[in-house]
């Protein structure tokens, strides 16, 4: 049966056509396609690796962020504590200062008062002396008008002196 | 160890794939015989119908309307031994017409082929390079292959890391599968050298298998079910295997590791066996592909022709019998078409994997002699 005898014309055409297709694809088709596939495969693998690294870095960053926040909070608490003590100290200092100042003022006021009192006493003394001198003058002036009385008085004075 | 694994794969693949080979043709032939036996029924010649469809032709027969054939004429190119080259449309030879001394006899040795009468008045065949149905299908499939893959290559060149479109992704899936699961395991680091051939052969066979299944005009040529085509494919594998075979490969053929008396010139038994084995591999490739596809086509054609055989056998109730058989035949044909669709892929796969393994076996390099442990039991 001629079905099982290869037709020479078809063999020639087949050799030609398949040979050409093979040659053309082997030169211009497959190398490019296979290379691109390879390249893409590598690219994807690399991208995945990079993404993993990025995720790792990111989770590291997240941890870092958390750490930073935690340390900031600790710092804050510490600072608040410090501020409080500082505040207290400042208040205490201020109080102490105020007390000291007040004491000083009181002391100086007292001194002043004492001084003024002394001055007042001195003035009063002077005034009393002056007044008594004036009174004495006036008395003397009146007394001296009467000789007798004068001598009486002198005599009493003398008496008093001798007695005392 | 690796060698053993390859060998086992080879054996299992061969067993697996030759089973349908032996099953299908016998079935096909018996059914074909049945068809031929009922040829006597009037009006329908089943054998002619069958072989007309799986065979080659000078024109693309589409259908018949009122007994008038509708066909696309193709180009006849012949070289007469006495008169030189001729090229003309096959329409000129229709219905047994003679053109420039050429005609197509309807009977005799050269039935259905372009012949001429030589000076002595004998019928001889000129050297026939006609664009027949098969050659047309071949050229079409080659054009399609080139278009697809050159366009694909251009797309990759333009945008190597871009997102592939749908068609590209589909082809990529197949290419990557072939590359990673067939070519690389068989050829290892030499895969880059041989993958262009194996990929071309896979897509060539697959495309022609599928095109053979489409029964309408530009397709339908039974190319991979034609011995000439599978022979050329097998020859390619044969020459690639042997031309690129390593020294070790040749040494294993002509000076194998067997006792000297088996390879002496007195009785070069091993050499003969080994050399024949290099031939049987491509011959098996050739016959396997041919028989599978051929048988598939025959079965479908037989199922369809059953309709006409039965309606011709019972002329009194031909319409009822015909339509009754048609339901069954079409149901079976649909099933067979599904099967053939699968076979189209399987045979392309098998041809490629076996080619890869044959080429891979011829690639193994000299390595330190592995001591085979001797069993003492």
Image: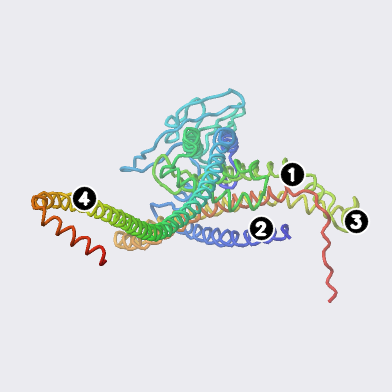
Residue A1, image x and y in percent? 57, 48
| Residue at the spot of label 2 | B10
Q: Tell me the quadrant of the picture where the C terminus of chain A can be found.
A: bottom left
User: Which label was assigned to residue B260?
Assistant: 3
Distance from disc 3 to disc 2, alpha carbons, whole Å, reads 28 Å
Instruction: Tell us which disc is closer to us: 1 or 3.
Output: 1
Nearer-N-terminus badge (1/3) = 1
Of residues B314 and B197, the one nearer the viewer is B197
**Number of residue marks:** 4
Q: Which chain carries label 4?
A: A
Cα distance between the residues tagged 4 and 2: 148 Å
Chain holding disc 1: B
For mark 1, does the 10 Å Cα neighbourhood hold few (<14), some (14 to 19), or many (20 or more) residues?
some
Task: Specify whether A123 is left or right of B75.
Answer: left
Q: Can residue A86 be seen in this view?
A: yes
Q: Mark 1 points at which residue?
A: B245
Instruction: Please say if B366 is above or below A31.
Output: below
Q: Residues within 10 Å of mark 4 (few under 14, many from 20)?
A: few
Q: Do labels 3 and 2 share a chain?
A: yes
Q: Given the image, what chain letter belongs to the residue carrying mark 3?
A: B
Q: Is mark 2 on a helix, strand or loop?
A: helix
Q: Position of residue B107 (x, y in %)?
A: 51, 42
Q: Name the residue under label 4.
A: A126
Question: What distance separates the C-alpha of mark 4 from that of mark 3?
Answer: 163 Å
């Amino acid at each position: 049966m001629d079905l099982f005898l290869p037709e020479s014309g078809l063999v020639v055409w087949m050799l030609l056509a398949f040979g050409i297709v093979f040659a053309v694809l082997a030169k211009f088709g497959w190398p490019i396609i296979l290379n691109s596939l390879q390249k893409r495969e590598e690219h994807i693998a690399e991208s995945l690796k990079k993404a993993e690294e990025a995720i790792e870095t990111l989770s590291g960053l997240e941890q870092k962020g958390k750490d930073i926040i935690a340390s900031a909070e600790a710092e804050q608490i510490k600072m608040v504590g410090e501020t409080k003590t500082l505040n207290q100290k400042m208040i205490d200092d201020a109080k102490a200062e105020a007390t000291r100042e007040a004491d000083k003022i009181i002391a100086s006021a007292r001194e002043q008062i004492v001084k003024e009192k002394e001055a007042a006493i001195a003035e009063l003394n002077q005034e009393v002396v002056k007044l008594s001198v004036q009174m004495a003058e006036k008395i003397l002036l009146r007394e001296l008008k009467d000789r007798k009385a004068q001598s009486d008085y002198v005599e009493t004075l003398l008496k008093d002196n001798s007695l005392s | 160890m690796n060698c053993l694994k390859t060998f086992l794969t080879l054996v299992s693949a061969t067993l697996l794939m030759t089973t349908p080979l032996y099953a299908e043709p016998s079935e096909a032939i018996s059914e074909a015989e049945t068809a031929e036996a009922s040829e006597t029924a009037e009006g329908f010649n089943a054998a002619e119908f069958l072989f007309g469809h799986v065979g080659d032709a000078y024109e693309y027969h589409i259908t018949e309307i009122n007994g008038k054939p509708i066909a696309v004429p193709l180009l006849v190119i012949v070289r007469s031994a006495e008169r030189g080259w001729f090229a003309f449309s096959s329409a000129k030879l229709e219905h047994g017409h003679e053109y420039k001394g050429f005609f197509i006899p309807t009977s005799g040795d050269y039935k259905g082929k372009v012949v001429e009468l030589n000076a002595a008045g004998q019928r001889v065949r000129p050297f026939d390079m006609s664009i027949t149905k098969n050659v047309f299908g071949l050229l079409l499939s080659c054009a399609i292959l080139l278009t697809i893959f050159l366009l694909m290559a251009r797309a990759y060149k333009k945008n190597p890391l871009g997102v592939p479109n749908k068609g590209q992704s589909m082809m990529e899936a197949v290419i990557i599968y072939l590359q990673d699961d067939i070519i690389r395991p068989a050829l290892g680091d030499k895969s880059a050298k041989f993958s262009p051939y194996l990929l071309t052969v896979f897509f060539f066979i697959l495309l022609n298998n599928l095109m053979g299944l489409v029964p309408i005009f530009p397709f339908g040529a039974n190319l991979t079910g034609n011995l000439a085509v599978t022979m050329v494919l097998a020859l390619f594998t044969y020459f690639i295997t042997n031309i690129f075979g390593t020294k070790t490969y040749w040494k294993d053929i002509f000076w194998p590791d067997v006792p000297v008396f088996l390879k002496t010139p007195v009785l070069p038994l091993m050499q003969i066996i080994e050399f024949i084995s290099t031939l049987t591999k491509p011959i098996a490739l050739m016959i396997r592909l041919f028989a599978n596809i051929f048988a598939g086509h025959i079965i479908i054609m037989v199922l369809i022709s059953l309709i006409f055989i039965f309606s011709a056998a019972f002329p009194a109730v031909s319409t009822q019998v015909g339509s009754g058989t048609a339901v069954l035949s079409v149901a079976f044909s649909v099933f067979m078409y599904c099967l053939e669709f699968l076979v189209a892929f399987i045979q392309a796969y098998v041809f490629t994997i076996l080619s890869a393994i044959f080429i891979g076996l011829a690639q193994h390099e000299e390595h330190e002699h592995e001591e085979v442990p001797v069993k003492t039991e």
